[in-house]
Amino acid sequence: MNNTKGIIVVISGPSGSGKGTIVNELIKNEQYALSISATTRKPRIGEKEGIHYFFMSKEEFLEMINKEELVEWAEFCDNYYGTPKSYIEDKINKGKDVILEIEVQGALQVKKIYPEAILIFIIPPSLTELKNRLLKRGTETSEIIEKRLMRAVEELDFVKEYDYLLVNDSIDNVVNEINMIIKTEHFKANRRTSLIEKIKKE
Amino acid sequence: MNNTKGIIVVISGPSGSGKGTIVNELIKNEQYALSISATTRKPRIGEKEGIHYFFMSKEEFLEMINKEELVEWAEFCDNYYGTPKSYIEDKINKGKDVILEIEVQGALQVKKIYPEAILIFIIPPSLTELKNRLLKRGTETSEIIEKRLMRAVEELDFVKEYDYLLVNDSIDNVVNEINMIIKTEHFKANRRTSLIEKIKKE
């Protein structure tokens, strides 16, 4: 599989869907590379350049936007965050599957630029379960939790733009399912055109 | 998974690709049903109605064509062969995945009528290997073998219309790969719309 191009895999889901934990499990597999974001935010203690983020000045970031070197970007609390194309393309050309954990708007932007990317949406088994998970964290007020639930329902309208929908009943199950999805996506006929050419040349 | 609709799975490949053996292995799994053809050919000894074929008169077959009750059909040595829609639809409505072993033209016809069907094309590891397999059978003249190889190369042009391309390096591998493909196809967001509706109603 190493001589074929890697696949871009976007993972989204509401806050409380468990997508963060799932991504952390996935990237233990050496076949995958986690996409690294560029940001104008200052590094926090322990954060390393090129591992947690590509840190840069506002001027550098704006230049990346102008040169269309970002797949998607957003401004949040006076800082810019974005996904550099070069890192993703370098990894997929080396045959690695690149995982992006990204929200709905960004995901659709990725699909626009890379139509061959696969979009996976993760949902909790039910809204009740989602509410319970958010309550369990104990970090948010009930007002914020209500907002998050409303947002989760709104986001469901975008699920039809996604390729796969997974129900997070257990982290292990979902990780296995994503591994299977990526494996079978490599069998897609339109990803194996070089194989067809090779046989024809015979 | 039993409350969701089954998937139509079409399997094609050149003579010598091993697709017959693969299909026989697959249908040992109770989740799958093999599509049964209608034919005007007389039953051979041991062949049972509704198991090997739906046997019928030429008049009955022509009526099925007129009523558009066949997904695809062909005439071969003065006999008609075709795939009845009713059998397939009955099985997928019961949640079974229906396997069709069918040649390229028929496969494209299935996709036209059922765009949600998945088409899998199986190839041998190389043309040399395909030739060896055909020679090993010892049932065909070298002239026929050459014709089959030419046809196999021609068919490769249609692979881009297929969803998946699998290389038959071992029967077990391909059977596993097809099982994985069918499993992940059930995770497709557009096959899980009822799940989204259910959560929204909450």
Image (cartoon, coloured by chain):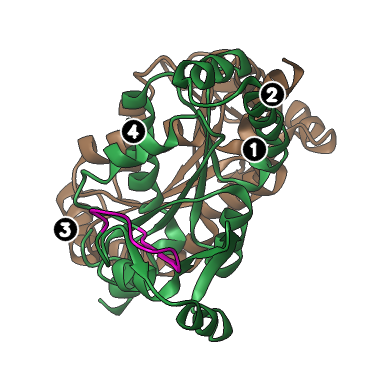
Chain colours: A brown, B green
Look at label 4 and name its amino acid: Val
- Image quadrant in which you'd find residue A202: top right
Give the CA separation, mark 2 to mark 1: 9 Å
Q: Position of residue A114 (x, y in %)?
A: 68, 40
Which marked residue is nearer to the observer: mark 2 or mark 3?
Answer: 2
In this rendering, position of residue B54 left or right of residue B84: left
In this rendering, position of residue A30 left or right of residue A194: left
Say which chain tag 2 marks: A
What is the crowding at mark 1: few (fewer than 14 residues within 10 Å), some, or many (at least 20)?
A: some
Residue at 50% x, 62% y is: B116
- Image quadrant in which you'd find residue A80: top right
Same chain for the residues under marks 1 and 3 in the image: yes
What is the crowding at mark 4: few (fewer than 14 residues within 10 Å), some, or many (at least 20)?
A: some
Would you say residue A74 is visible in this rendering? yes
What mark, if any, has residue A132 been given in the picture? Answer: 3
What is the crowding at mark 3: few (fewer than 14 residues within 10 Å), some, or many (at least 20)?
A: few
Say which chain tag 1 marks: A
What mark, if any, has residue A190 been given in the picture? Answer: 1
Which marked residue is nearer to the observer: mark 1 or mark 3?
Answer: 1
Residue at 54% x, 80% y is: B62
What mark, if any, has residue B51 been given in the picture? Answer: none
Which residue is tagged 4?
A: B175
